[in-house]
Amino acid sequence: MVCIPYLQKKIIYDFDDALWLTDRKDEAKVIRWLKWRSKIKSICQWSYKISCGNDYLKSYATTFNRNAIINPTTIDTTRTINLQIKKDNNTVIIGWTGTHSTLKYLQEKEAVLIQIQKKYPSVEFVFISDIKPFFDSIRFRFIQWNLKNEIDDLISIDIGIMPLPDDPWTRGKCGFKALQFMALGIPCVASPVGVNSKIVEHNVNGMLASSDAEWITSLSQLIENKSLRNSMGVAAKEKIHAQFSLSSNSNNFLDLFS
């Protein structure tokens, strides 16, 4: 790594997580050593330009290099723009998608999900991941994630959820779950953490919820009001196409090479 500055190459560094931090309180010393997170500072200093997924990441990068550009996580809307949600019945489906590393954020909202299932017994929970989540007290359908069926699996969902705790690690998240739902015209209830508050406009294209009570209220409103889900879904799709699509961010990307 120390030889990089002497290669005389223009390095463009891209990151979309708070890689200088960890989200694990019990991380072993050997893992910390292997991760070598202090290298992020050095890479930023050595880089010609830095591509950052949000303002929070850029604020870190500019401490070491003023040539930092925000390139938000984007969606290829050419794959989603004309897709329509097709429902065979009136069952409302609340869905979450993510990897095993973020399942803990979903599981932290188990109390909310229990209350929703008690209040609305016909509501179905669908969780898409690489491993099956563990819940003691709720019924749900698990879908093994795979790229081929990803969009078909997501488009069956009526309400997306993206819960997050508010901490230095999660503030570096770039809202990909919310973006996926919204690009398909699915309103999302999300925690107002980091870039989520820029992606989701409360009561316009989705809802932001902090406390468990706010989560229950937001989900209840969307469950009970199909026209609200539809109108927010339309606004959500428009927001992603205008601000978080490949086409709307092509100039940001090209600026990295100027």
Image (cartoon, rainbow, N blue to C red):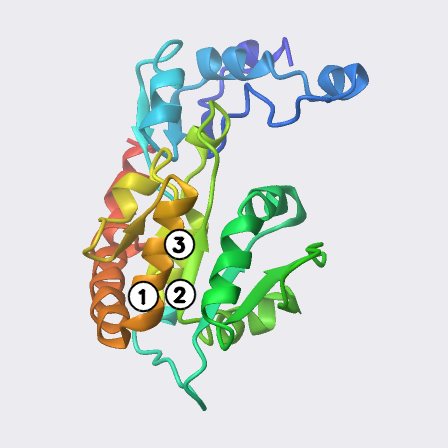
Residue 113 vs residue 243, the one in the foreground: 113
Identify the residue position indicated by label 2 in the image.
159
Which of discs 3 and 1 lies nearer the camera? The answer is 3
Q: Position of residue 197 (x, y in %)?
A: 29, 40
Instruction: Tell me the quadrant of the picture where the N terminus can be found.
Output: top right
Q: Is residue 147 above or below residue 227?
A: above
Instruction: Looking at this view, name the residue that lies furthest to the bottom.
Output: 88
Q: CA distance from mark 1 to mark 2?
A: 7 Å
Disc 1 residue type? Leu
Instruction: Tell me the quadrant of the picture where the C terminus can be found.
Output: top left
Secondary structure found at label 3: helix
Residue 100, visible in the rendered structure: yes
Identify the residue position indicated by label 1 in the image.
222
In the displayed structure image, the side of residue 62 where residue 115 appears, left or right: right
Secondary structure found at label 2: strand
Quarter of the rendering containing residue 60: top left
Residue 214 vs residue 127, the one in the foreground: 214
Residue at horizontal 45 percent and vertical 66 percent from the top: 119
Identify the residue position indicated by label 3 in the image.
216
Disc 2 residue type? Ile
| Badge 2: residue crowd in 10 Å (few <14, some 14–19, many ≥20) | many
